[in-house]
Image (spheres, grey):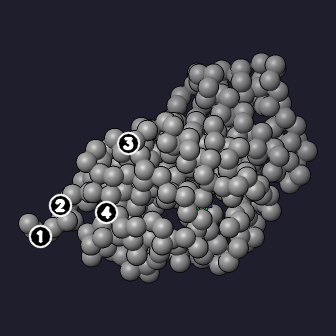
Amino acid sequence: MTSQHHQHGNAHGNAHGNGNGHRHGHGHGHVPAADFDWDALAAHLEHEADLRAAAVTEAARWLSDLYDQGLQGPEGTGGVRRVLDVGSGPGVIAGLLAEAFPAAEVVAVDQSAALLERARTRSGARLGTQQADLPAEFDKLGEADLVWSGNAIHHLGDQQAALTSLAGVLRPGGLLAVAERGLPARYLPRDFGLGRPGFQSRLDAAHEDGFSTMRAELPGSTEEVEDWPAMLERAGLTPSGTRTFLVDRPAPLDRRTREYLRTQLGRLHDQLADSLPPEDRSTLEALLDEEAPTGILHRPDAFYLSAMTVHTARKS
Ligand SMILES: C[S@@+](CC[C@H](N)C(=O)[O-])C[C@H]1O[C@@H](n2cnc3c(N)ncnc32)[C@H](O)[C@@H]1O
């Protein structure tokens, strides 16, 4: 299948593409009509997932509690036995889910064989993998007690149909947890001494337009008001709560996080440069400068602040 994506302020929710290296452009800054090469983004996706690791672990603890609260009597489901991470990418988050649910079989599901291979290399036998090109291959997933999907559903044309298919694989009492949106990442103060203050807000606005274009160009694209709890209810589930988890790396940043930010800004430049006013384009290019002290690799004021929102719902 073919995916269309663009890039967004985060690597997630952005890239999407075929496991066979077809290009797509989008991230959490999505680029209109660009093809995304998910395989090529492997290291970037891993780094972004590493940044969110503490937030994901906290979310997993919450999901474990939520699941237990849903158990009904001795005939209850008996604990989480199988977990799917749908649209797992290179499997960093699936690995965290495996740590959080040590008694469960955890399976990373993605269209990209190359990303799943990275997941296996990192996690070994602890993690199962299943290649599946969605929505055509939802039947490859098997049953689960917990389905996690982070920044992947927005890469499918019909998000409501995708949720309904995911609800279909849940066992009774099972939970679907969808991490979509949250807050766009901030890297810099409102005024950081280059160009017009408010640069990142304008970048976000350009990115949102790109995201809409990306979605409109997906195969089978349908327009949907993105009220995730309502969509989960329409999928036949009972909403069981939404929570947001902070991702907070204050300045000064380590080199690896700076390199992540530079890659992300570079992706945004590739995708959005033509739609930015000249002054903002110059600011973006100054931030990308690898040598200048004002570049993102060197400036002391760079930070990483974002938030991951997780919507949950239960199968009765
Ligand atoms: C933005 S990444 C998110 C990765 C991971 N869930 C995370 O949050 O770090 C989106 C993932 O969805 C996968 N994907 C995109 N479209 C897909 C499709 N149609 N079928 C299966 N996987 C898909 C991509 O290969 C990519 O690994």
277 relative to 17 in the view: left or right: right
Sequence-wise first label, 1 or 3: 1
Query: Is residue 203 depicted above or below 294 in this figure?
Result: below
Q: Which mark is residue 145?
A: 4
Task: Identify the residue at horizontal 68%, vertical 67% (top origin).
Answer: 1
Mark 3 or mark 4: name the one nearer the start of the chain.
3
Residue type marked 1: Glu
Give the label on residue 78, or none. 2
Q: Nearer the viewer, residue 264 or 75?
A: 75
Question: Answer yes or no: do the residues labelled 4 and 1 have beta carbons within 8 Å?
Answer: no
Per the image, the residue denoted by label 1 is 75
Left of 186 or right of it: where is 30?
right
Label 2 element class: loop
Location of residue 255 (image quadrant): top right
Would you identify the image quadrant in which residue 143 lies?
bottom left
Q: Quadrant of ligand 1?
A: bottom right
Nearest to the eye among marks 3 and 2: give it: 3
Quarter where residue 171 is shown: bottom left
Query: Of marks 4 and 1, which one's residue comes earlier in the chain?
Result: 1
Q: Are marks 4 and 2 in contact (CB under 8 Å)?
A: no
